Amino acid sequence: MKRTRSLVSSRALAVTVGVLAVAGVVGAQAQVAARRMARPGMPAAGPGGVVNLPYIVADNTGSQWRVFQGGWLQQSGNMPLYSQGAMLTVNGAQPATNNNTARVDTDTGELVFENMTANGLAITRRVLVDKDAGYVRYIDLVKNTTGADVTVNLQVNSNFNYGLRGGQNVPDPRRKGQDVAWVGQTHANGMAVVEVYAGKGSKLDPNINGQVNNNVATGALSFPLKAGKEAGVLHLHAVAANVEAGVQMVSNLKEKDLLASVPREVRKLIVNVANSQSFVMEVEVLRGDLLDVVELKTGDQFKGTLKETSYALSTFYGPVELPVERVVGVMNVGKFRPRQLVITSDGQIFGGSLKKQTVDLQLSSGQVTQIPLAQIARAGYRKREGEPEEWTFDKPLVLMRSGERVGVRMPSAPLEVVTRYGKVTLKPETVAAVLLQTDDGGAHEIHLTDGSKFTGLLSAEQFDMVLDAAAPAGAPAAPEQVVKFPTSSIARLQLVGKVAEQDEATSTLEMANDDVLVGTLQGKLELETAFDTIAVNAGEVKLLTHASDTNTDVSVTLWDGTTLSGQLKDQQLSVALASGATMKVPVALVVKYEQPQPQPSTQMIDKIKEVIADLNADDWKKRDRAQGQLVSMGPVAAGVLRKLRDAQPPEAQQRIDAVLKELEKAKGDKTAGASTNPAAGQ
């Protein structure tokens, strides 16, 4: 069964909206970083931060972590578990290096391995022993220097000093059917090793293999990488008192902590950890603990109580006024023409020019000072009661190319989309998202809630929308605000955000241009065969593919196994999408149409109805015989039984349920038999 996929994740949002110049904030952060000294307890580095290997760091538990050439690690001390941890393989090769030295980044404390290669790819490893958090963090960066697009297959292996006697995968709480880590119990007094291969909500699904009764754990990730581009994978390695403590450690991990010390230019390359919600466009949202905070571009910070009553913004899509109860932070962005980003408690981002050019802050002494907006890098409110722990982007949103993320109400007007299949009218509630800013540019990518995906162009030049001005609990409702979004300025339009879960009964149409339509063929098909023209009810088609290398001849398989080949008289197929829209699809573009539960013929449906009527007969023998007949008809009866079930008396419903269960069991047994048949793969 396929997983339900969220089309919008925190990292996806950050990537989609683009990157803005944040010179004011970055300048302040650079000055703060320049004043940092090497971390306490970090071994002394030579000129340029260069150290000899193995590099040794002691953690707060008394263990020592030794990092060797190539970046693999070893644990020493009292009952060490790791013998060779975090060994890296990229596309089947271990990164090669001739140096027995590495560089210490004195700003972050990371040990950096540079200029390594593997099959034409450039590899950089950044290793941090986080003594407070209790883990070793790796960021493996891969740059494609081959001149052609590649698929990166990255594998991380760890060997242990003690055999593994048990273990378990740790599921991703944000993505059904996906795991983020493996925790293995060793023979060393039950102590556990903790291997984390992805953050919660990762777009990449790691393949995790902890080998019980052995001493090896492996995590593998695969991702495409365009020529000249770079991407990074983050993974963690740690020990815990037992499996339960290890699982709890993974559950307590937060993306903002994993990424807190990661340099901005590295953080945006990581593909298996969703960008922390504490960051907006790679800059951390400033928040106070007990007091509000205003940070100047010089790096100085003032703490106290912000006295603003509201934030009035002039934006290119209209004036916006935000009550102070919704605002959690403000940023100044842009070097030559600074503007402000106002962040709300539910994760929305509004960009423009604040009407008021000063920020009023009451210091702890009681004095109120007015700080010029031009001198401010960031301002943030203290945590308020009732604030969500995480932002959830499951409501209608408009993501702008300039960086804004604006919540709106569901539009009432339909969306008109021009596609290669003609003009299509879509109800807003059937649209999961529209990607207007794609990698290849040009056409827009439309995702429907039924799982359909196709390219086209939104015909509207602008969208008139009402802002979602949901106020925090207890706060007065905000007045309705209407804004106008130019289509050319939108990077992503999200209306629902999630697609429906698909199963084995889902009918799909795969197209040569990579479009996928979830729906069923409609009407009558006239197939011109070598000897006659045969009329086929489209609902009875189980499979339709091209019969040869030509774009005109097709092969059609019907519900009962009948196979026909020929040329369709009409070179367009009518497709009714599960979401309600109808399309005309050129036969030449069709790769495959598959309907797992085709409709039987009219005669067969009438026969099934007759047998169903006997399920309610007075004679129990007749009822048993009818039930057996339905089972013998096989899967073809399942769809009809499901449609007619609710209209039947209680006992007939119970018998139909039993028939469906038998049919599912028979289908499962057949599948299992095929997969275990030694000759199946020959």
Image (tube, grey):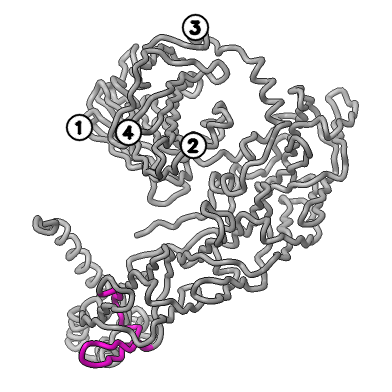
Q: Is residue 505 rendered to the left or right of residue 635?
A: right
Q: Is residue 320 above or below residue 464?
A: above
User: What separation in Å lies between label 1 and label 3 (alpha carbons)?
Assistant: 43 Å
Compute the Cα span from label 1 to label 2.
Answer: 33 Å
Residue stretch in magenta? 524-547
**Alpha carbon distance from label 1 to label 4:** 33 Å
The correct choice, above or below, for 416 with respect to 121 in the image is below
Q: Residue at x 14, y 61 (%)?
A: 673
Mark 3 in CB contact with mark 2 (< 8 angstroms): no
Nearer to us: label 3 or label 2:
3
Looking at marks 1 and 2 on the same chain, the residue that comes earlier in the sequence is marked by 1
In terms of sequence position, does the residue under pointer 4 or pointer 2 come before the other? 4
Q: Is residue 80 magenta?
A: no
Amino acid tagged 4: Asn
Classed neighbour count for the residue bearing mark 4: other residues with Cα under 10 Å, few (<14), some (14–19), many (≥20): some
How many angstroms separate mark 3 from mark 2 (CA)? 29 Å
**Label 2 sits on residue:** 270
The answer to whether residue 610 is seen in the rendering is no
Can residue 527 be found in the magenta stretch? Answer: yes
Disc 4 vs disc 3: which is toward the camera?
4
Residue 218 placement (x, y as % from top left): 30, 34
Which of the 4 image quarters holds residue 366?
top right
Mark 3 nearby-residue class (10 Å; few <14, some 14–19, many ≥20): few
Q: Which residue is mark 4?
A: 119
Looking at marks 1 and 4 on the same chain, the residue that comes earlier in the sequence is marked by 4
Q: Residue at x 29, y 22 (%)?
A: 84
Tag 2 secondary structure: loop
Residue bearing mark 3: 46
Say whether residue 277 is visible: yes
**Which dot, 1 or 2, sits closer to the camera?**
2
**Disc on the earlier residue, 4 or 3:** 3
**194 w.r.t. 541: above or below:** above
